[in-house]
Image (cartoon, coloured by chain):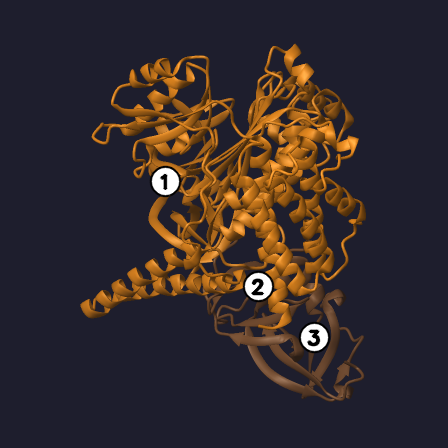
Chain colours: A orange, B brown
Amino acid sequence: MDHAGYAALFLTESREHLRACNQALLAWEQDPAAVEPVDALFRAIHTLKGMAATMGHDAIARVAHSAENLLDALRTGRVSVTAGLLQLLFGAVDQLANGVEAAGAGTVPASDDSELLVALDRAADGGAVGAATAEYAVHQILPAGRAVSVAIRADAPMRGGRAMLALRRAESLGTVTALRPAAAAFEREEFDGRFTFRLESRASDDEVVAAIVSAGDVASVTFEDAVPERAEPAARGRQIRVDLRRLDAMMKQVGELVVARNRLVDLALRRSDPELEATAERIARLVGGLQSEVIAARMTPVGEVFDRFPRLVRDLGRDLGKQVRFEMEGEDIELDRAVLDEIGDPLLHLIRNAMDHGLEAPEDRLAAGKPAQGRLLLSASRERNSVAIRVSDDGRGIDRAAILAKARREGVIEAAADTLSDDQLLRVLARPGFSTARAVSGVSGRGVGVDVVATRVRALGGTLAIQTVEGKGTTFVVHVPLTLAIVRALLTSIGSERYAVPLAYVAETVEFDARSVTAVRDREALIVRDRAIPTVHLRHLVSLADETTPRHRPSVILEIGERRAALVVDALLGQQDIVVEPFDAPRGMPSFFGGATILADGAPALILDAAALL
Amino acid sequence: MADSPTFHAVVFRVGDLICAAPAGIVREILPPLPATRIPGVAGAVEGLVNLRGVLLTVIDAHRLLDRPRRDADEGPIVVLDVAGRQCGLLVGEVKDFVELPPAAVAPRGQLPGVDPRIVQAVGNHGGEHFVILDIEALLAPMLGS
């Protein structure tokens, strides 16, 4: 391999080691008596030192060497661990990260490491750590309480429902955190009836067991030791690194193969040649299999992006003087690499927002009758063909009245409006420029950069939603598609035109009956199971003339979070995998078209963007 | 083009108007293809066509130049490079590929009844005058930014 190849590998591997360093430090900070984090840290820094020295990055090797010396002193007990020492090690890891990134960019680290080196060496000799770092108290970042593990009887009917009930019983005793799998997974086919969580409660173990068992069909309730296991990639030796560009190229090829397959199957059906049909059928299945394999190869656990947040939250908490318990759920949920790469920044924004403006200072929380320590939850869950990522805080919530007043003043909403729903609130907050206005930050501060987040998420074909209760907290929900390249879509038609609706946001299809519509605030709405859903007539949307249409027509219920709309079409033509094709959209193309594709018969078709319709 | 020795152009007819595009920006000539309408865009946009697996926006030159389409015209598509992007121009008939000596090109020429803003030059081939279109000025406003 040439030097550039090694340099690229050095960068990716070093980043992984640094991530491991941060994880180990956080775990160590949580439990200063633990041994494993120290060993893990030692290993990672030692490897980093070796690689840096080989590659000629002496500055990195120097810092790693001093940090290693300090760790050795700590491991052998010559020096005992203090909060100040941990902070010093955090600083050393940061300096290593600076050095690695600078080496990757071919530059020299911006920050000087001489003071750090002196401090590390002095600490390794048992010297005191500077006063500035010694004062900090250990923050609790990982969840507290007992680890409880529950198994529902394998033969129980409605395992998911039982599990939910058992969880509710546990929640009645105290605070439940770190639930795995996420509650949303209980209803899934593959849920085996086992789940774990942490329970903070004054109830005795026996009381906890009794409460959970009372849900019925509970096979066992066990308590585990406090250290949450960190899943190490066990099959490390059986993995290889693949350049992402190669995976992208494969994905593109497979995308075109899917289009060609669709075309082949379509042609074969018209020829009525059984042999051709059978062959086309077989190729179709093989391509389908290949497609799912390539998508699977691109799928990456969201944990890879989540992993950098515990350290961030810890540091923000220190900087802002806030106490926070940060929890993550659903780290094993997978997303297409391309989606994952784009989702980190918006999440970072939301977490910063929650830390900065959502969570109150400890004294304010106490004054409001809440525990001094706030809670911040980052969770991922599968929902149909999309993934929902939630950033949830139990802070002060958003002052609706203030936002409403401001929105009215600026003419963003009608002057007559006297309430703001969550949806309207988000629309107001996500208006470019609105959020930066001083009146908002003076009152709740919330909204800084929400427009940026909304734009980034929209660009991914995703959506942003907000739920907030004043005094109780705020949750931002980001929905993103599992993959960007190939989308399962429902084909609909209006007259002779066909439009594709991505299935990710299709809740169901129902029949539209012109006689059973009602009007809600002057808008036509369809009643589905006692809920009025506003209708959108695709025929009007695409500006086709009204024709005499049958009274009964299919309508597609689109759903994003709590927003729904019934898209009334002439006919449903079935599902198809479509490849979103790039094209230069002519000026003025309506925003409710999210792109275009080539259908099985070779004709181009436009893709409707559910998010823009709702 | 005035300083180049000869000027190459693809000559086509739009309704009753003979016009041409500089050969350097013409990628290929396609037979008529079914287009998918794009609702909500300017009227001259014919729609999207599938060019061997790639989507191409096609603009109808008849509507763009306000020349009625002849019934017998099938509508071949001239694929053009416009400001780094490709787009199709649906014309009535592709007539010829011509090489013009500098004397046969009048860079600031005009023809009666033709909007001067779209005229880059006027060519003369075998005694027939035709408009060399300012393709970028014509098509760029139709394409997204």
Mark 3 vs mark 1: tell me if same chain: no
Mark 3 vs mark 2: tell me if same chain: yes
Taking depth in this image into account, of B104 and A430 the one nearest to the observer is: A430
Q: Circle 3 — which element?
A: strand
B17 is higher (above) or lower (below) than A98:
below
- Output the chain of dot 2: B
Q: How many marks?
A: 3
Q: Using the numbered discs, state the Cα–Cα distance from disc 3 to disc 1 in whole angstroms.
A: 47 Å
Q: Residues within 10 Å of mark 3 (few under 14, many from 20)?
A: many
Q: Circle 1 — which element?
A: loop
Q: Quadrant of the N terminus of chain A?
A: bottom right
Q: Residues within 10 Å of mark 1 (few under 14, many from 20)?
A: few
Taking depth in this image into account, of A528 and A282 the one nearest to the observer is: A282
Q: Using the numbered discs, state the Cα–Cα distance from disc 3 to disc 2 in whole angstroms.
A: 17 Å
Whether residue A341 appears in this view of the structure is yes
Q: Position of residue B142 (x, y in %)?
A: 64, 58
Q: Position of residue A108 (x, y in %)?
A: 77, 58
Q: Which residue is mark 1?
A: A549
- Output the chain of dot 3: B
Q: Which residue is mark 3?
A: B131
